[in-house]
Structure formats: C-alpha cells, structure tokens
Image (tube, helix red, strand yellow):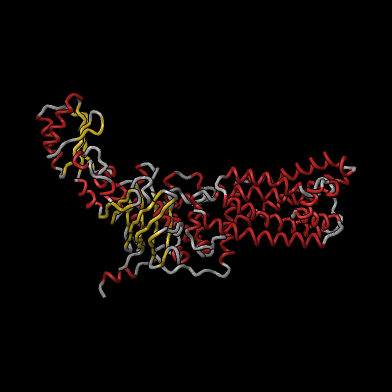
C-alpha cells in the first residue's frame, strides 16, 4: 500500500537560519512515524509544513497524494493536528471545544455532539465533558487535544511533542491513547525529544539534527547503533573510582567513562554484562553505592550518530558535516 | 480474497474517510460557530464587557456636565446635540480595543494553529471575531440610550429612526473594526496594537463636532472633520435622533462602512494568511 504522507527534500529557511536542510519523511497507513531530535532540530517546522501552516522553500510534501501547498484545502480535510502547546480553548468546556471543531468540519451541531461525547469517553474525559478546560491538569489537556485532532477521522494525525512537560507517570496514559489512534488505519507522525517515547510508540524512527536526517530505522536498529545498554556504577568509596573504571573496562572490552563526579559508565552489548560486573566488583572488594543498567538515552544515540560524543575519544574527530 | 483483507475493510470507521461535504454557505456557518466561541467566552467572563458599559457612562457624564454649560448654554441643550455623537463614540470604543487586542492575544495561542489546519475559509476566524463583538456594540448603544434617558435626553424623531441610528452606528463600528483586525494581524506585539488603537481614538472621535461645533475649530481641523468618516456617522446619528439633515449623512456613513470593509477585510485576511 502507498504511503499516507510523503515529504521529499524539504527545505525551510527563516532569514539566515536554516530550519530544514532537505529532509524526507513518509509513513504507511496504520503506522506511527517518530521524528526524534533535540530542541531546534526542525521537528516543529516539518510538522507545520505537512499541516499546511507553512510553505517549504524547496522540496514537496503530499498527503494521500495531495500537495500540501497547491491542494492545501483538500489536505486540511485529511489531517488532524495537535500542536506543541495545547491547541484547545481554555474558556470553553471540553465538550464545547470538540463540538466547535466538529462544526468547523461541517458536522451539524446534533451530529457533532454525539461524536464529541464518544471521543471524550474514549480519551478518558467522559466525566469532565462539561468542565472548563482552564481547570484541567496538563495530562487532561493533552488528551483533549488528541481527541480534538480525531474528530474528522483524519488519514494522518500530527502530534508535536504530545508529552513534553507531562509528569512521567502521566506519559503512559497518553501513550496508550496514541497507540489506539492508528487502529482505524490512520497514520501518526509524532515528534519527540525522548527516545523512550519513540521506542514505545513508533514503528519507524527518523532522527533529525540541525534540519537534516541523520538516521532512519526501527528503535531496535537505532539502539544497535549505540551499542545496547549502559552500566553505571557509583562506588561507596569515591577513591575506588579508578578500580571501578578498570573493572568496567574489562567487562565491556573498551574504556569506561566518567560523565559525572564519582560515577563511571560503560556501554555493554548483552545483559549478561550486569552479572559479570557485579561478580567482578565483589571479587575486587569494591563497595557500591549505586549500580544501574540503562537503555541508551537520546543523548547517547545522538552522540553516537553525530559524533559529538565528547566522551568518545575515538570519534571526536568526526564533524557534523561528515555525519550529515 | 484472503481473510486478512476482509478484516481491514470491515473496520467500522475508516480513517481518512471522505469528509463531510461542505454545506452551502459554509463560510457563514464556520464564522458563526467561531463567533459562538467568542460569545461563550464573554458569557463565562461578563466583566470583559464592563468597559462597554462604563465608557459610555463616563463620556455622557463628563461631556455633558463639564462642557454643557460652556458650549451648549445649558447641560440639557448640550445633551440633545452631543448624545448622538457620544452614541457613535461609544460604539467605536466598544469595538476597537476589544477586537484588535483580543485578536492579537488570541492568534498567538495554539488554537489558532488548529483553526488554520482545518478546511475552513481563512477569513472565518476573523469574521467570527468581528461578529461576536456585535454584543459589545449592542451593550454600549443600549447604555447610551438608558443613561441618556435618565439624564433627560429624549428622541425627537421616532422609535424607528432611533433604531436606525443604532443600526447605522453599529454597522459603522463593525466596518471600522476591520482596521483594528488588520493592525492585529500585521503587528505582533499586543501592547503596540493597544497603543496605536487607543491613540487613534483622538483624531477619529475628536476631529468632529462632537464636543464643539465645527465652525469653532481651526481651519486644518475643520478640513479633517469634513472628510472624517466618523463625523458623517455622527451627523447621521444626530439626524436620526433629533432631526435635521438625515439622508445625506446616512448615505455617506453607509458608503464609508462598505468602503472600509471592502478595503480592510481582504487586507486583514491576506495579512492573516501570510502570518506564520
């Protein structure tokens, strides 16, 4: 089946700043494309172009075959948008917000109300339908925002950093709902700063930095680029840090790093490495204050991909131009 | 043919299903839906139209009791000649700051991004905003009539003519508000919009015979007063409320209203489309 949306060679400049330097994006029906990158990478600019809010300087983008610039009115019938900041009206109730958007999508009031109620129930807001949005928590607003982007049964929904600023605990709720959004065959484009989030939701991940795509693959493929997990150790006695570095170096087969005071980290491939680390630390008689096995963070993926990794002497010569 | 294909096609709601066809006059429906949004905001926060009540009361009290004796000979005679002008001033004031400033604040919020991503006419959010402000004009006009009556003003013509005065005034206020809409689209800083709008009240409202007869003004101000569209509307209001020359100023005011909308509404929509 063809892609729901496609972008080719998108370029956007704002004055002397180049927000997008030629990126390609695409997603198949029923899939989630994660666009991962730090602040200022160009994620929001890409979403705004695909949502017809901004025209690209170069390149083209289509939704279901319709050009986002030339056929913008047709594209707007096919998309749902949830912006980075809650795009709902605080002075209206949750129900009024959804009914308004339904009416703007040419539903009659009596058709819009049941549709709105159904979506509010689905997004866990059935109980608070009549409450003013100003009284909502951050998580409730985001969920209302998601519901609002679903009113017109869009072929593609753009979610621009849907969980930024939410408590980690509330993130799970929003994730569950985003996963359900593709069940009717719609595609989702999700931008995020969190690898964890892309990992939990995206079928396909595009990593962008400074307006360029620097990697493209599944979450597993991207993690393999970084090299699996990170083991982090803080010795009970800070003077033993050098010994910890030696132990971690032996386990991993490459040099351990000290990203923070009194903490040594090393990247490992398998989870067997944790057992071995514990065994060797005990054998060396090193008391441990903290010991953790972590997945790679966005920072680490990012360092690995761009070569900015200051702690990786072997790659310090790689410049951004090479990575791009 | 295969079972898997059947499962997908029987899904109850298909994403990207053909959209609901646009109704006839979709732009009007969309604008009205958006106007209702603004009205709901006013209903939730009635204090926000307090200025539409307070300003007319202040104008009437200050002008009539301060200048009445000096300019009009008596406060009562002065009230008769100045209330029709204050009616216009109050209506313009009720719309100008609210329309320009509220829109300038509103457009920066996320919800305007959503409006832009919807398949609605680009002008709908702007028309909706201008339409909702009719409530403010009605409140201001009603206040002038009620307070004016209590102070001793009596309509010299007929109730129908008084309604026509309100109509011409409100039509002019709405038409003029497209200028403030354009400002709000072009200028990003809300405080600057507010300053420009507030200051423009002086040449517009006071470059007229509202406070004193035009003959007593210096030549350059007389020249301005004769072309000032607000002067025409004030003359129309005076003719309709207390009698005198009516037809010409009413036609002039209505032509100005049409002209203002014809020029500034499209300009505001273009500015809105360009704004990113």
Residue B226 occupies quadrant: bottom right
> Which residue sits at x=56%, y=66%?
B26
**Towards the viewer: B155 or B96:** B96
- Can you give x and y, in whole percent of width and height, for residue A230 in the image? 21, 40
The quadrant in which the N terminus of chain B is found is bottom left
- Can you give x and y, in whole percent of width and height, for residue A314 in the image? 18, 41
Q: Is residue A83 left or right of residue B274?
A: left
**Towards the viewer: B235 or A278:** B235
Res. A118 in view: no
**Towards the viewer: B268 or A147:** B268
Q: Residue furthest left?
A: A283
**Towards the viewer: B248 or A56:** A56
Residue B255 occupies quadrant: bottom right
Q: Is residue B240 left or right of residue A31?
A: right
Number of marks in the rendered image: 0
Residue B192 occupies quadrant: top right
- Can you give x and y, in whole percent of width and height, for residue A136 in the image? 47, 45
- Can you give x and y, in whole percent of width and height, for residue A315 in the image? 21, 42
Q: Residue furthest right?
A: B73
Q: Is residue B170 above or below residue A106?
A: above
């Amino acid at each position: 089946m063809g892609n729901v949306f496609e972008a080719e060679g998108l370029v956007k400049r704002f004055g002397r700043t180049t927000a997008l330097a030629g990126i390609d994006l695409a997603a198949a029906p029923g899939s989630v494309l994660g666009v991962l990158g730090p602040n200022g990478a160009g994620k929001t600019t890409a979403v705004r172009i695909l949502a017809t809010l901004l025209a690209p300087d170069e390149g083209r983008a289509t939704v279901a075959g319709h050009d986002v610039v030339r056929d913008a009115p047709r594209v707007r019938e096919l998309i749902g948008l949830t912006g980075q900041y809650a795009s709902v009206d605080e002075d209206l109730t949750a129900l009024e917000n959804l009914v308004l958007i339904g009416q703007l999508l040419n539903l009659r009031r009596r058709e819009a109300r049941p549709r709105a109620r159904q979506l509010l129930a689905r997004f866990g807001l059935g109980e608070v339908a009549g409450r003013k949005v100003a009284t909502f928590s951050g998580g409730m607003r985001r969920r209302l925002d998601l519901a609002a982007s679903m009113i017109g049964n869009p072929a593609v929904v753009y979610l621009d950093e849907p969980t930024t600023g939410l408590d980690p605990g509330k993130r799970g709720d929003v994730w569950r709902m985003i996963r359900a959004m593709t069940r009717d065959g719609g595609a989702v484009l999700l931008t995020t700063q969190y690898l964890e989030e892309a990992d939990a939701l995206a079928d396909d991940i595009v990593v962008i930095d400074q307006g360029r795509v620097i990697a493209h693959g599944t979450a597993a493929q991207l993690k393999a680029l970084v090299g699996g997990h990170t083991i982090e150790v803080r010795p009970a006695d800070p003077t033993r840090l050098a010994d910890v570095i030696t132990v971690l170096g032996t386990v991993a087969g490459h040099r351990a790093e000290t990203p923070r005071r009194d903490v040594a980290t090393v990247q490992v491939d398998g989870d067997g490495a944790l057992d071995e680390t514990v065994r060797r630390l005990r054998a060396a008689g090193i008391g441990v204050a903290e010991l953790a096995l972590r997945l790679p963070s966005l920072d680490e993926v990012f360092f690995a991909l761009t070569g900015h990794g200051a702690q990786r002497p072997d790659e310090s010569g790689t410049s951004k131009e090479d990575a791009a | 043919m295969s079972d898997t294909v059947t499962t997908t096609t029987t899904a109850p709601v298909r994403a990207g299903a053909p959209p609901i066809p646009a109704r006839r006059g979709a732009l009007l429906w969309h604008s009205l839906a958006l106007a209702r949004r603004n009205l709901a905001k006013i209903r939730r926060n009635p204090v926000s139209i307090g200025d539409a009540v307070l300003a007319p009361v202040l104008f009437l009290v200050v002008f009539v009791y301060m200048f009445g004796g000096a300019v009009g000979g008596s406060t009562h005679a002065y009230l008769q000649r100045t209330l029709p002008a204050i009616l216009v001033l109050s209506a313009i004031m009720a719309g100008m700051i609210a329309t320009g400033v509220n829109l300038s604040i509103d457009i920066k919020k996320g919800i305007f991004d959503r409006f832009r991503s919807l398949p609605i006419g680009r002008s709908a959010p702007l028309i909706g905003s201008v339409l909702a402000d009719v409530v403010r004009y009605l409140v201001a006009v009603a206040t002038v009539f009620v307070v004016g009556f209590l102070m001793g003003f009596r309509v010299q013509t007929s109730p129908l003519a008084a309604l026509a005065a309100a109509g011409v005034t409100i039509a002019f206020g709405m038409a003029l508000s497209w200028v403030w809409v354009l400002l709000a689209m072009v200028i990003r800083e809300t405080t600057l919009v507010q300053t420009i709008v507030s200051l423009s009240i002086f040449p517009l409202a006071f470059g007229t015979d509202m406070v004193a007869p035009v003959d007593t003004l210096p030549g350059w101000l007389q020249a301005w007063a004769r072309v000032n569209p607000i002067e025409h509307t004030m003359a129309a209001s005076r003719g309709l409320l207390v009698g005198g020359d009516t037809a010409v100023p009413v036609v002039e005011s209505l032509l100005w209203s049409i002209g203002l909308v014809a020029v500034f509404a499209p300009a505001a929509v273009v500015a809105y489309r360009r704004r990113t």
